[in-house]
């Protein structure tokens, strides 16, 4: 079945540092890929998405590129802020019926001033 | 503003009780999902529904059932709550079309004592 593997956290960075959170996936067909973010005490919200190979999703300074050849969708940001502290989830929506969404285990990011 | 609303933020129930978690969405979405979130395990799908009165088991359905009598409402039922069902429960909904993201509620933190 479909699966998502993302790097374990927690990740601790200083403000203005460069961020990479790795994500790889296993799926049949052509899934859509997502990054969700969960701020403390809240539900998940969509950060960005990509629906086909070589697409780049971007939002709030975050970017991720759908790489079919390496089955990856790594999240990057050039300069993190304290307000980016949250848990980040990589996810895919399978190409089969009913668009079931499969999530990775989440990576907690802490940004210190 | 689009919304997925879960009936409670926090619940404390006793072992053996029957527990109902309610979720309502106002976006006319066909798909609705129940996940549980546990540290180190990410989000695991319990059940999903792709239409009124239709349901499919997710990855961890044991000990749970669901009900979808109206399109906007999806209920998760713990028939006889146990301490290992202490968790954060997240409801989500999405359109049937491919490539659309899921929208999440704020979560219900359930403690079974």
Image (cartoon, rainbow, N blue to C red):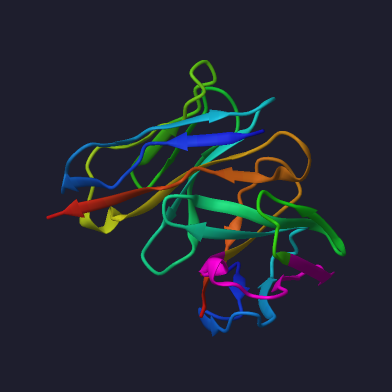
Instruction: Report the side of A51 relative to A79 (left or right).
Output: right
Considering every residue shown, the one lying at the far top of the view is: A69
Instruction: Report the side of A111 relative to B16 (left or right).
Output: left
Residue plotted at (60% across, 75% down): B6
Viewer-proximal residue among A72 and A16? A72
> Over which residues does the magenta segment extend?
B65-89
Residue plotted at (49% across, 57% down): A45
Residue plotted at (52% across, 23% down): A71
Where does the image place residue A40, in percent across and percent down from the top left?
A: 36, 65
Magenta stretch, main secondary structure, is strand
Task: Reply above or below: A66 against B103.
Answer: above
Task: Reply above or below: A40 against A32.
Answer: below
Instruction: Report the side of B5 relative to B69 (left or right).
Output: left
Where does the image place residue A43, in percent across and percent down from the top left?
A: 49, 64
Considering every residue shown, the one lying at the far left of the view is: A113
Task: Reply above or below: A36 against B83.
Answer: above
Image quarter of residue A93: top right
Is residue B63 found inside the magenta-colored segment of the image?
Answer: no
Residue plotted at (22% across, 42% down): A79
Q: How many marks?
A: 0
Considering every residue shown, the one lying at the far right of the view is: B53
Image quarter of residue A17: top left
Name the quarter where the N terminus of chain B is drawn: bottom right
Where does the image place residue A99, in percent across and percent down from the top left?
A: 71, 44
Instruction: Report the side of B39 relative to A50 (left or right).
Output: left
Where does the image place residue B89, in percent across and percent down from the top left?
A: 56, 66
Viewer-proximal residue among B15 and B2? B15
């Amino acid at each position: 079945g479909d699966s998502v593997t993302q790097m374990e956290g927690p990740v601790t960075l200083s403000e203005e540092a460069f961020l990479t959170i790795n994500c790889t996936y296993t799926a049949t067909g052509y899934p859509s890929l997502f990054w969700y973010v969960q701020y403390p005490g809240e539900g998940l919200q969509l950060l960005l998405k990509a629906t086909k190979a070589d697409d780049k999703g971007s939002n709030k300074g975050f970017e991720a590129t759908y790489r079919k050849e390496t089955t990856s969708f790594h999240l990057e940001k050039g300069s993190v802020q304290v307000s980016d502290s949250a848990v980040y989830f990589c996810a895919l929506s399978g190409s089969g019926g009913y668009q079931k969404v499969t999530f990775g285990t989440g990576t907690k990011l802490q940004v210190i001033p | 503003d689009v919304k997925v609303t879960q009936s409670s933020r926090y619940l404390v129930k006793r072992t053996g009780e029957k527990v109902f978690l309610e979720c309502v969405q106002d976006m006319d979405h066909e798909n609705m999902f129940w996940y549980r979130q546990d540290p180190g395990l990410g989000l695991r799908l319990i059940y999903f529904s792709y239409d009124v009165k239709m349901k499919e088991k997710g990855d961890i359905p044991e000990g749970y059932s669901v009900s979808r009598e109206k399109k906007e409402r999806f209920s998760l039922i713990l028939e006889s709550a146990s301490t290992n069902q202490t968790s954060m429960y997240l409801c989500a909904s999405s359109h049937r079309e491919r490539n659309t993201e899921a929208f999440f509620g704020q979560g219900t933190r359930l403690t079974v004592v």
